Amino acid sequence: MDTQTTIESLARRAKTASIELRTLSSATKNAALEAMARAIIERKAEIFAANALDVEGAKQKGLEGALLDRMTLSDKKIAAMADGCHQVAALPDPTGRVLSGEIRPNGLKIEKISVPLGVLAVIYESRPNVTVDAAILALKAGNAVILRGGSEAIETNKTLARIIGEAATSVGIGADAIQIVESTDRSASSHLAQLPQYIDLIVPRGGEGLKKALAKVATVPIIFAAGGVCHVYVDEFAELDMAQSIAFNSKTQGPSACNAAETLLVHRAVAPQFLPLMAQKLIAGGVELRGDDASRALVPQMGEANEEDWDAEYLSLILAVKIVDSLEEAVEHISTHGTAHSEAIVTQNVRRAEEFLAKVDAAAVYVNASTRFSDGFEFGLGAEVGISTQKLHSRGPMGLESLTSTKYVVRGDGQLRG
């Protein structure tokens, strides 16, 4: 069977499964999630064995650093997957909620209720945890899901999908509710994106290349969980020790994540005090610095930044540094080079903070906190399918509510329109 035929078969079965999922009780969905959590822990030897194959293959292909770290599982990461299942099970069911309602003068009772989207396809790259996160959120919201992971972690993703799928079927969930694309053929993603008769939404999690490739061919609605060129701006009214801690955490706590800072902006008034010590701390932490002329005058060991650096999502321990003359210049730089993901200001001036919050257009905007908090778990959503950087339907970490739509339910007793 060729790739296109295989993908269409997956999608058709997912559509059929989604009809049954609409009527699942919260108790059944939660039982499936708890069964998944147990299975992940009980069968972690299988998961580690599959992951070892992927990691070895990635090393042979020259993958290293943060990208290799993304796909390498540990006991801690396995436990986090299981914990995510428990947390989503504990969250309220997002479907069947009456969002608004009224009885019209003609006696019609009209209610707006939350309902599942239907069939969700998630296309992602090297993080195996997305296999579990996407599946559990889709199921809790009553959706069927098709998972399309990157080729570098294919064995891990297939094993995880099989384990959680079998756990779900053990409590009565249909076998086609959770499916994974096993082919590594690059055309699989394009085929998924062109099946609007079966698939209701695609969420791509990856770089700008994936985003552009899908945007060219997609006929299925897409919410892009795209790249994060995130900034930390140290204002002239910043508490500098706090600024050091926030900038360091934003860059180094998870450098391969989309919410890691890629550019540090520093107000010229505090740059002589702040930047040399900040650079010393970052360099000691293994960070390569690339700065503009003003920054390099203060930190001679800093490399030279070019125009491409301001738009780079490094996903590694590299940080671009720029000195600015004002809050307005910082906001303009973010507007020009940011990806509307996560942006932070460090300041003790309330007026400056509120101005930054109002003027910066991003999914998450921070005052005196690390950009690394842009995450479904940290926002209390249990997990996330991705972080949307667009504005329609969903923006920011996409939890359960983002995987629902609405339906008007109208009850009457024979009313006719005159």
Image (cartoon, rainbow, N blue to C red):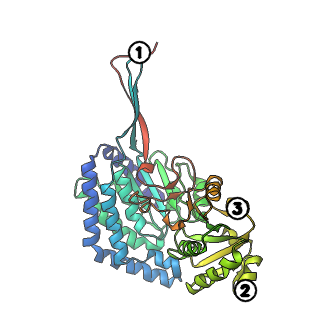
| Residue under the image location 42 percent in, 36 percent down | 407
Identify residue for label 2.
Answer: 300
The amino acid beneath tag 2 is Pro
Q: Quadrant location of the N terminus? A: bottom left
Q: Which mark is residue 327?
A: 3
Q: Is residue 318 left or right of residue 102?
A: right
Q: Is residue 219 left or right of residue 137?
A: right
Mark 3 vs mark 1, CA separation in Å: 60 Å
Q: Is residue 153 left or right of residue 319?
A: left
| Residue under the image location 59 percent in, 72 percent down | 243
Residue 389 drawn above or below residue 261: above
Identify residue for label 1.
Answer: 416
Label 2 secondary element: loop
Mark 2 vs mark 3, CA separation in Å: 25 Å
Which of marks 3 and 2 precedes in the sequence? 2
Is the residue marked by circle 2 packed among few (<14), some (14-19), or many (20+) residues within 10 Å?
few
Q: Is residue 177 left or right of residue 310?
A: left
**Disc number lying in front (3 or 1):** 3
The amino acid beneath tag 3 is Leu
Label 3 secondary element: helix
Which of marks 1 and 2 precedes in the sequence? 2
